Every structure is written in structure tokens, then in C-alpha cells.
Amino acid sequence: MNGTYTAPELPGRFGMAEIAGGWRSLEGAPRVRILRNEGRRGGGYWVEFAYDEKTVLRRPIRRCWNVCYFELYGWITLRYDSARDILMLSGYGKYRREEDTGEDGTARV
């Protein structure tokens, strides 16, 4: 070893813009969308947790001591693996990003 230490990238350290968009569970859990809160001064993000088309819960995302979470019958923490583009929600498992198709037919992420 040369005496230098490089800290590994932590899954809790990510920008909220990195996870914005739609996410589909790999394990059959409800769909999730991360949205920018344009109405809040200084920004912020929301999570939409969709059990079905009629049951969509929207909650603000918070960050405390590098833990990103939202409250849904208790804390649900979010972790993001940028190398694999996987979002992990505690209690709900792993999510893969959905590709969104725009009006012109091109894929948006």
C-alpha cells in the first residue's frame, strides 16, 4: 500500500436529481416516482408511491445525517447505486429506472 486511502462511494451519497424519474420494482412492490417540488421555495423533492392508479401517496423526501428517507407508516430510506442504476427502498427492495417515452417518441430518462 502507498499510504493513501480512498473512501468507497457510499450509497447514501447521491444528488436528488440523479434519482428523479420513474422506478419499477424488481420484486413486485408498488411503482415509485421521484419528482422535483417546484412549488417549494429552495426546491425539494417528492416521492409518489403508487399502489395502483387510484391509490398514489405523495410524500416529501427528507435528508438527515446523510440518510435520505420519506415517511410512510414509518421511515422508508432510499439508497442509490449509481454504478448499476438501482434504487433501494427499505422494506420494499430494489427498483430499476423506467424509461419514459416523450410525445415525439424518443426515450427520456
Image (spheres, rainbow, N blue to C red):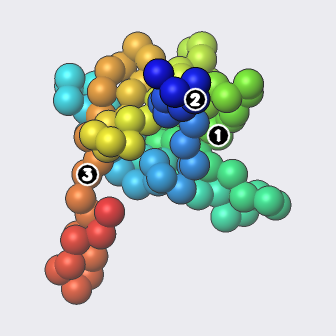
Task: Please give the residue where the numbered disc 3 appears in the rendered image.
Answer: 98
Q: Amino acid at mark 1?
A: Pro
At x 39%, y 27%, the residue is: 88
Q: Position of residue 76 (x, y in %)?
A: 53, 21
Figure check: 99 above or below 94: below
Task: Please give the residue where the numbered disc 2 appears in the rendered image.
Answer: 4
Cα–Cα span, label 3 and label 1: 21 Å
User: As drawn, is 42 to the left or to the right of 49?
Assistant: right
Secondary structure at badge 3 equals: loop
Quadrant holding the C terminus: bottom left
At x 55%, y 42%, the residue is: 14
Figure check: 104 above or below 21: below
Cα–Cα span, label 3 and label 2: 39 Å
| Quarter of the view holding residue 108 | bottom left
Residue 60, numbered label: 1
Task: Kindly give the residue lying farthest to the bottom in the view shown.
Answer: 104
| Quarter of the view holding residue 80 | top left
Q: Position of residue 101 (x, y in %)?
A: 23, 70
Task: Kindly give the residue lying farthest to the front in the view shown.
Answer: 2
Q: Position of residue 27 (x, y in %)?
A: 20, 23
Secondary structure at badge 2 equals: loop
Cβ atoms under marks 3 and 2 closer than 8 Å: no
Q: Amino acid at mark 3?
A: Glu
Secondary structure at badge 1 equals: strand
Q: Is residue 72 visible?
A: no
Q: Amino acid at mark 2?
A: Thr
The residue carrying pointer 2 sits among few (fewer than 14), some (14 to 19) or many (20 or more) residues within 10 Å by Cα, namely few
Cβ atoms under marks 1 and 2 closer than 8 Å: no
